Amino acid sequence: MGTKLPRKLEQKMECVGEQIKLARLRRNLSIAQVAERATCSPLTIARIEKGAPTVAMGIYLRVLYALQLDDDILLIAKEDKLGKSLQDLSLKNRERASKKE
């Protein structure tokens, strides 16, 4: 499997990279400082900030931890709107519970 993503996902990866870069700049940290704290190379940090799809999820977590943003990972898929809608549809089709006598 190649590393090419659909354009929509590439744009989202670039957006995430830009958000991480802005978080780093707001903290006045250099790429080298974040790399040292995340125990990876400065090149990897630069690739994350550009939205490269080949960087492992674990490294993203270490970078978020280095920026004190690791709790943000818990926001992924938190609002499962489609799943909740599908679940609600299946609940509407169920019959009423029988009355207890």
Image (cartoon, rainbow, N blue to C red):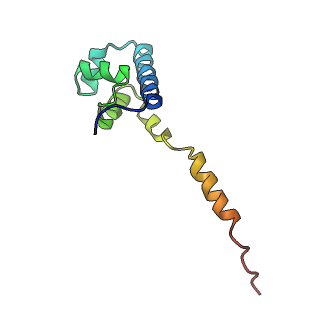
Number of marks in picture: 0
Residue displayed at 61% across by 55% down: 86
Q: The N terminus lies in which quarter of the figure?
A: top left
Q: The C terminus lies in which quarter of the figure?
A: bottom right
Front residue of this view, candidates 53 and 4: 4
Taking 101 as reference, is 61 above or below it?
A: above
Q: Where is residue 51 in the image (x, y as percent from the top left)?
A: 37, 24
Front residue of this view, candidates 85 and 31: 85
Residue displayed at 23% across by 27% down: 39
Front residue of this view, candidates 8 and 77: 8
Taking 3 as reference, is 86 above or below it?
A: below
Residue at the bottom extreme of this rendering: 101
Q: Position of residue 57 (x, y in %)?
A: 33, 36
Q: Where is residue 46 in the image (x, y as percent from the top left)?
A: 31, 18
Residue 6 found in image quarter:
top left
- In the rendered view, does 44 fall on the left or right side of 74? left
Front residue of this view, candidates 91 and 31: 91
Residue displayed at 66% across by 64% down: 91
Taking 21 as reference, is 86 above or below it?
A: below
Residue displayed at 26% across by 23% down: 44
- In the rendered view, does 24 fall on the left or right side of 97? left
Q: Where is residue 29 in the image (x, y as percent from the top left)?
A: 35, 14
Residue 49 found in image quarter:
top left
